[in-house]
Image: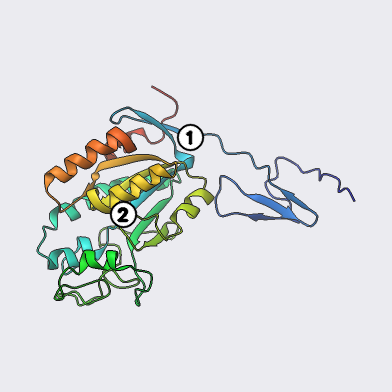
Amino acid sequence: MDIAEPKLNPAVETPTDAVQLGAGSNYRWVTRDGHVDMSMSPPAPLRAYIPAEPQAVTVDLRRCAMIVVDMQNDFCAEGGWVQHIGADLAPEIAPIAKLQRLLPALREHDVPIIWLNWGNRPDRMNLEPTVLHMFKKRPADAGIGEPVPGKGAPLLEKDSWGAAVVDGLEPLPGDVHVDKYRISGFWDTPLDSILRNLGVKTLLFSGVNLDQCVLHTLTDANFSGYGCVLLEDCCGTTSPSFCTEATLFNVKLLYGFVTSSEQVIAALGKTGMP
């Protein structure tokens, strides 16, 4: 039996006898008894022109998300794992001040903020020896899930002090939290599904360590079809300077674009090309 097409008022987003399905504002279904409307029009682009290397980019803020990688206590706070192993905390802390200015500006334009932190299962059942070995190369080392001398919190364990976002950066209720279990935030996580449901096409990258978790999450994003923009001044690493140089070189050559938080802040709200 044919069902007549409902005559919906285009000015009404959702009929009173219908519900919306979908987490993102860019694309949803409207469903009611006997009919599902899949025809939601995408929102008009909100363009921001950002000077960058190797080329300037224009991004659509309505299809953009900010990824903040591993800005958590085990890497960025006194008493955490990085300090325990004797590494310099200064480059890990450096992005905080830049993000304190940038994140509110992005929220004003409804750009989703995604906190991507190590947050492992207490039983570590999803972690292969290859992952465990990165943190426990010797029997005496504090491995994933084991107490870190100082605070005594289990290393990188979900809901622990070490997995929490570092003081100075305040996630808000509308932000998105994704636990990761490897260097890349795309492996074995819902990150890709969340981004696609939000209608995201372009990702801004920040966090630590630039040449490790930030880089490999960015490269996997590139391989998955996302446009990638690295915010150099919002990243840090405890690695030698040549690691930063190689990372920036390869991002500009192969994987995306490099700019600064100041350039993004200046671009927010601007539309069209200069």
Q: Secondary structure at mark 2?
A: strand
Q: Is residue 34 above or below residue 160?
A: above
Residue lying furthest front in this view?
Answer: 129
Q: Position of residue 73 (x, y in %)?
A: 24, 65
Amino acid type at mark 2: Val
- Dot 2 crowding, Cα within 10 Å, few <14, some 14–19, many 20+: many
Looking at the picture, which amino acid does disc 1 mark? Answer: Leu
- The answer to whether one can see residue 63 in this image is yes
- Give the Cα distance between marks 2 and 1: 25 Å
Percent from the top left, x then y, of residue 181? 34, 63
What residue is rendered at 50% in x and 54% in y? 193
Residue 200: assigned label: none
Work out whether mark 2 precedes mark 1 in sequence or the reverse, and give the earlier one. Answer: 1
Which residue is denoted by mark 1 in the rendering?
A: 46
Image quadrant in which you'd find residue 54: top left
Is the residue 82 above or below the residue 42 in the image? below
- What residue is rendered at 63% in x and 55% in y? 21
Q: Residue furthest top?
A: 274
Res. 259 visible in picture: no
Quarter-wise, where is residue 245 in the image? top left
Horizontal and vertical percent position of residue 270: 41, 31
From the viewer's perspective, is 36 left or right of 54?
right
Q: State how many labels appear.
A: 2
The percent coordinates of residue 98 (x first, y second) are: 25, 47
Residue beneath disc 2: 69
Labels 2, 1: front one: 2
Which residue is painted at 37% across and 74% down in the image? Answer: 125
Pointer 2 with pointer 1, Cβ within 8 A: no
